[in-house]
Amino acid sequence: MKLRCLIIDDEFLARQRLLKLLEPFDSILVIGECKNGQEALEKISLKEPDLIFLDIQMPDIDGFTVYNTIQKKPYVIFTTAYDSYAIKAFKINAVDYLLKPFDEERLAIAIHRILEIQKTNKSSKLEEQIKRLLSSLQQESSPFINQISLSSKGRETIINIDDVIYFKSDGNYIQLITSEKSHLYRETMNALYSQLDPSQFLRIHRSLILNIVYIRKCIYINNNVYKFELKNDIEVLSSRSFSSQISEYLSDQP
């Protein structure tokens, strides 16, 4: 699939030269030219190019202002006769910075760079799609939940069950403790525990459910009470009423 590009430069001869230089590149399709910043903004909005070759110094709107104004940003390769803007260009994630007069060899380096970036981005998007699909399939095939959806002030937050170190009851809510922060979830401990995979989660107290992945150490205290040291350096005590579940868990440990 070809990259659709716009050439933006106030100099007619510069546009014509770049058009000529781009002819050998089958991966590039020029869909238009713009002779100033205002025309560029209009055509970018209308045609939504994948790539723009953008001059910096133009009489009405400079190239940086054009790029910063664009909502849906394409890849950008700056073309200019001045090297003083290079640092600023790369700070806004320009793919390349071509100093006029550049030749076909230098242009080829820029084109190759953008194709590699595009290939990497496609690969990352595909990987993310596969992860979402696998997560969806696992959720459909398993009777246990693998995510919890939280809503607060109109915003939804998804918590992956695997990221929860432990659950702790807090009045009418449950605290979901992760390595980053604590979240509040309105549910009862009994209802939540019935939805969790018992091979991954251990209830040690009526108010505590541990993710066994994050258990660092378990020490017997006395009178069927155990102390659990978790990987976030938190220590919690079990209650005697859950000693049988804990004993079963310990018997499965190597």
Image (cartoon, rainbow, N blue to C red):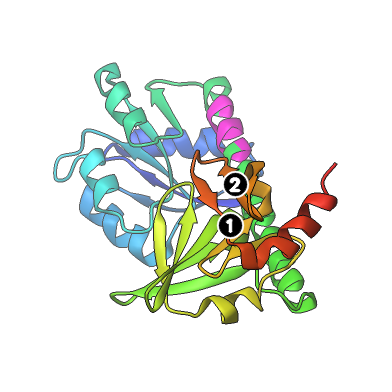
Pointers 2 and 1 in contact (C-beta within 8 Å): yes
Taking the spot 28% from the left edge, 36% from the top edge, the residue there is 11
Q: Position of residue 133 (x, y in %)?
A: 71, 67
The answer to whether residue 215 is above or below residue 166 is above
Q: Is residue 29 visible?
A: yes
Please, what is the three-letter code of the amino acid marked with disc 1? Ser
Q: What's the magenta region?
A: 108-116
Disc 2 designates what residue? 228
Residue 31 lies left or right of residue 239; in this view the side is left
In the rendered structure, find residue 74 and report the number of the disc placed on it: none
Q: Is residue 69 above or below residue 219?
A: below
Name the residue: 14% across, 45% down.
60
Is the magenta region chiefly helix, strand or loop?
helix
User: Is the residue marked by circle 1 packed among few (<14), some (14-19), or many (20+) residues within 10 Å?
Assistant: many
Residue at numbered disc 1? 238
Q: Is residue 92 left or right of residue 102?
A: left
Residue 101 percent across, percent down from the top left? 40, 20
Q: Quadrant of residue 174?
A: bottom left
Q: Nearer the viewer, mark 2 or mark 1?
A: 1
- The answer to whether residue 23 of the structure is visible from this angle is no
Element marked by disc 2: strand
Q: Quadrant of the N terminus?
A: bottom right
- Quadrant location of the C terminus in the rendered image: top right
At 28% from the left and 75% from the top, the residue drawn is: 153
Please tell me which residue is depicted at 68% across the width and 55% down the height of the picture.
126
The residue closer to the viewer here, 23 or 228, is 228
Q: Position of residue 243 (x, y in %)?
A: 69, 61
Query: In which image quadrant can residue 223 be found?
Result: bottom right
Indicate yes or no whether the magenta region holds residue 8: no
For label 1, the SS is loop
Q: Position of residue 109 (x, y in %)?
A: 57, 25
Q: Nearer the viewer, residue 144 or 92?
A: 144
